[in-house]
Amino acid sequence: MSPDPNTSTAHPGGEPDTGSAAVTVQVPAKVNVQLAVGPPRPDGFHELANVFLAVGLYDRVTARPAERLELGCTGPDADRVPLDGTNLAARAATSLAARHGIEPAVRLDIEKDIPVAGGMAGGSADAAGALLACDVLWGLQTPQEELLEICAELGSDVPFSLVGGAALGRGRGERLSVLEVGAEFHWVFATAEGGLSTPAVYREFDRLTGSAAPEPQPSEALLAALRRGDAEQLAACLANDLEPAALSLRPELSRTLETGRSAGAAAALVSGSGPTCAFLATSAQTAEDVAGALREAGVCRTARTATGPASGARVLHDRTDRTATNRTP
Ligand code: C5P
């Protein structure tokens, strides 16, 4: 079922009159500390060794009972979020309802803080958030494994958005093994004007690399740095095979990366398919200094600090008539 285009807008005039039941889920953004990309597979996807780290920039998704599927979005980038049936949060609600043979009679309100089309899995976060919020609102208690299956059908990064923390993603990124992380890492994220299309970045990767890309492997040194919580070692290992493709499409990002490095970041890289640039710092103070320098140089739209790992999709408020459970998947 598609959301009603007449009601699928942000609702500055107040909340819809659907009773008081509501479930709010918070979901983090991610940065890929390693993104090793292989050649294209027959299905068009690329085999990956994708080391995800969830970071503390969050979207919130609130689910409330409604007559039919409706979507709303607020936040600085809200006008760039599609509010039709293509929205991943809407698709998540529809998939979950279909599995259980029920109607997706729900209003989803997304409070958007993760950059849109920024390479930080914002759309995936909303999908994972909607899935968990609807599961709790509808009292389904879908097993975690089944939720992860639905996530994988929705998109390669969605399972990680549900789980959070740190994980190695194999296959197209959806087959996860949880990773140990020994400390909190300090990051700066420089967002850019406009987004980058993930398929376009992968196409550019193919154009630049052809079928010459080797089989992707996780870096043992990087996994050890995460385990030990060693920021300097992690900085030395950060790697994103999509970065040359993102820079080819958006050459001006080189200046952003260089500005952060000169300001004291231990390492700089494009986040996922970009155009957000990520900077690893060895202290909270250095992260603030790097963010300040990026803002001052005018090489980004915004510069935000955040730490990682962050928790995955998490129920913040459960105003249903069932016992409130602070459920984490
Ligand atoms: O899985 P998801 O829908 O997020 O992927 C978006 C696009 O990114 C795919 O259509 C594909 O072009 C590209 N992609 C890829 N290989 C992956 C993940 C994504 O080529 N492992």
Image (cartoon, helix red, strand yellow):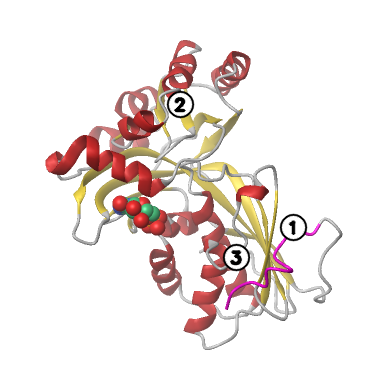
Alpha carbon distance from label 2 to label 3: 36 Å
Instruction: Judge whether residue 243 is colored magenta.
Output: no
Residue 232 position within the rendered picture, expressed as x and y whole percent measured from the top left: 37, 22
Q: Is residue 156 visible?
A: no
122 shown above or below 191: below
Q: Earlier in the sequence, mark 2 or mark 3?
A: 3
Determine which residue is flagged by label 1. Answer: 10
Q: Quadrant of ligand 1?
A: bottom left
Residue located at (23% from left, 42% from top): 206
The reply to whether the C-beta atoms of the residues labelled 2 and 1 are less than 8 Å apart is no
Crowding around mark 2 (Cα neighbors within 10 Å: few <14, some 14 to 19, many 20+) is: many
Neighbour tally class for label 3: few under 14, some 14-19, many 20 plus, Cα within 10 Å: many
Which mark is drawn over residue 280?
A: 2
In this rendering, the label closer to the viewer, 2 or 1: 1
Q: What predominant SS class does the magenta segment belong to? A: loop
Instruction: Respond yes or no on whether mark 2 lies under 8 Å from ligand 1.
Output: no
Q: Estimate the spatial distance between the alpha carbons at disc 1 and disc 3, rounded to whole Å.
A: 13 Å
**Observer-nearest of 222 and 34:** 34
In the current view of this chain or complex, which residue is farthest to the right?
13
Under circle 1, the secondary element is: loop
Label 3 sits on residue: 84
The segment highlighted magenta reads: 1-11
> Residue 225 versus residue 116: which sits nearer the camera?
116
Q: Position of residue 3 (x, y in %)?
A: 63, 72
| Vertical side of 321 occupied by 115: above or below | above
Examine the rendered structure and indicate whether residue 119 appears above or below residue 8: above
Residue 159 position within the rendered picture, expressed as x and y whole percent measured from the top left: 42, 60
Give me the disc on residue 90.
Answer: none
Q: Considering the numbered disc 3 on the image, is that residue within a helix, a strand or a loop?
A: loop
What amino acid is at disc 2?
A: Leu
4 in the magenta segment: yes
Describe the element under mark 2 as helix, strand or loop: strand
